[in-house]
Image (spheres, grey):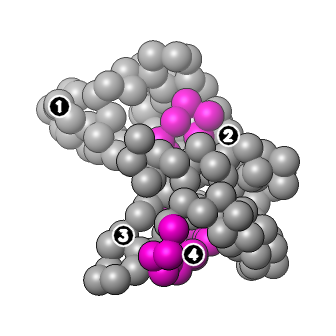
Amino acid sequence: MNIRDQIIQTVENRLTKLGFELFELKVIPTGPRKIVRVYIDSPTGVTIENCENVSRDLSMLLDVENIFGRQPYILEVSSPGADRPLQTEKDYQRNTGRPVKLKLKEQFEKSKTLTGKILGSSGSGVRLLVKEREVEIPFSQIEHAKIEFEFK
């Protein structure tokens, strides 16, 4: 098991107990130390105070579990931000009713970019309202997806 998988296994249960989910985890080697970036999320959002509290908690946990041994590391805890990519079915479900922009692996109606309103998702794809009609795009065809912001 690689170090990233060890960290994920160690922190996921703790994050759940704290009321958060692991959105993404990156381990970046930088010379003699590693940077561990943990992106957390929750249905109610993430505040700076949440990040500080989770950082203290995870730092103690990683030290107790001794994942890095004597190798120094830097732990960074953050939210994925407002312009986060949609990666899982849960992300699409959470954003039902919002506009989304998809970058597709293959053309759909002569374009690799598709913008529409999320109507829902299933295990195989996302349903969108595009120009007054419903379409379903398989998750396997989505290269990248982000929420489009509506300014009122």
**Residue 54 image-quadrant placement:** bottom right
Return the mark for residue 94. 2
| The C terminus: image quadrant | bottom right
| The N terminus: image quadrant | top left
Return the mark for residue 75. 4
Return the mark for residue 86. none
Asked which secondary structure carries label 3, the reply is strand
Asked which secondary structure carries label 2, the reply is helix
Label 1 sits on residue: 107
Q: Which label's residue is closer to the chain start, 2 or 3?
A: 3
Residue 38 in the image, given as x and y percentages of width and height? 57, 63
Q: Amino acid at mark 4?
A: Leu
Q: Distance from label 1 to label 3 (Cα)? A: 34 Å
Asked whether residue 115 is in view, the answer is no
Q: Amino acid at mark 1?
A: Gln
Residue at point 74%, 70% (across, down) = 60
Q: Distance from label 1 to label 2 (Cα)? A: 26 Å
Camera-nearest label, 2 or 4: 4
Label 3 sits on residue: 28
Q: Which label's residue is closer to the chain start, 1 or 2?
A: 2
Which of 19 and 56 lies nearest the eye of the viewer?
56
Q: Distance from label 2 to label 4 (Cα)? A: 28 Å
Residue 84 in the image, given as x and y percentages of width and height? 51, 58
What residue occupies the far front of the structure in this picture? 70
Q: Amino acid at mark 3?
A: Ile
Residue at point 34%, 83% (across, down) = 32
Residue 82 in the image, given as x and y percentages of width and height? 58, 65
Residue at point 36%, 70% (across, down) = 28
Q: Relative to 12, say whether 25 is above or below.
A: below
Q: Main secondary structure of the magenta part?
A: loop
Asked whether residue 12 is in view, the answer is yes
